[in-house]
Image (tube, grey):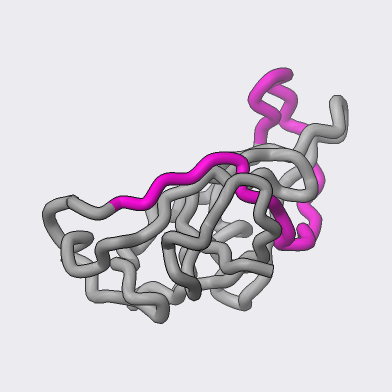
Amino acid sequence: MSEPGTFGLPVPPPMVNLETQRFWDATREGRLELPRCDDCGDVVWYPRERCGPLGSGSVTWFEASGRGTVYSCTVTRRIGGSWRAATPFVLAYVELEEGPRVLTNIVGCDPETVHIGQAVQAVFDPTPDGPALLRFTPA
């Protein structure tokens, strides 16, 4: 079971491996670093060393803006386990300024005010083991 983080949501430690290490190291420093495919130009989400559509292993990591917009969202009011105490909370897809859509939480606001098209900014919720979870707050 995970203890609540900065925003009152559980902060389970992420699964870090060699492919995702650079992403999680950046979150630990409060930065959003993502890979971009050198062949097609797409930003790769979930961060890894290969382009999903092309399978190309040629990617360049860059520091992303952390800005995005709410693409889709829902307010979770009932759930079990360690998330129960955090209700209500927002589960959302955020479309990053750089292109990919990220499944995440919107935090730091009344869940009822979150809406599609809303501008948001990345925030980082530290886990007990060091890497921080990527979440978003209204911009």
Report the quarter where the N terminus lies.
bottom left
Location of residue 89 in the rendering, given as x and y in whole percent from the top left corner = 35, 60
Location of residue 105 in the rendering, given as x and y in whole percent from the top left corner = 46, 57
Q: Tell me if 38 is positioned left or right of 93 in this view.
A: right
From this viewpoint, which residue is outermost toward the bottom? 6
Taking the spot 55% from the left edge, 57% from the top edge, the residue there is 21
In this view of the protein, which residue sits in the foreground, 35 or 91? 91
Location of residue 111 in the rendering, given as x and y in whole percent from the top left corner = 42, 62
Q: Which residues are magenta?
A: 50-76
Q: Tell me if 84 is positioned left or right of 74 in this view.
A: left
In this view of the protein, which residue sits in the foreground, 133 or 117? 117
Location of residue 84 in the rendering, given as x and y in whole percent from the top left corner = 17, 61
From this viewpoint, which residue is outermost toward the front? 112
Q: Is residue 67 magenta?
A: yes
**Quarter of the view holding residue 48:** top right
Figure check: 18 above or below 84: above
Q: Is residue 47 visible?
A: no
In this view of the protein, which residue sits in the foreground, 118 or 53? 118
From this viewpoint, which residue is outermost toward the top? 54
Report the quarter where the C terminus lies.
bottom right
Q: Is residue 61 visible?
A: yes
**Quarter of the view holding residue 65:** bottom right
Taking the spot 29% from the left edge, 67% from the top edge, the residue there is 10
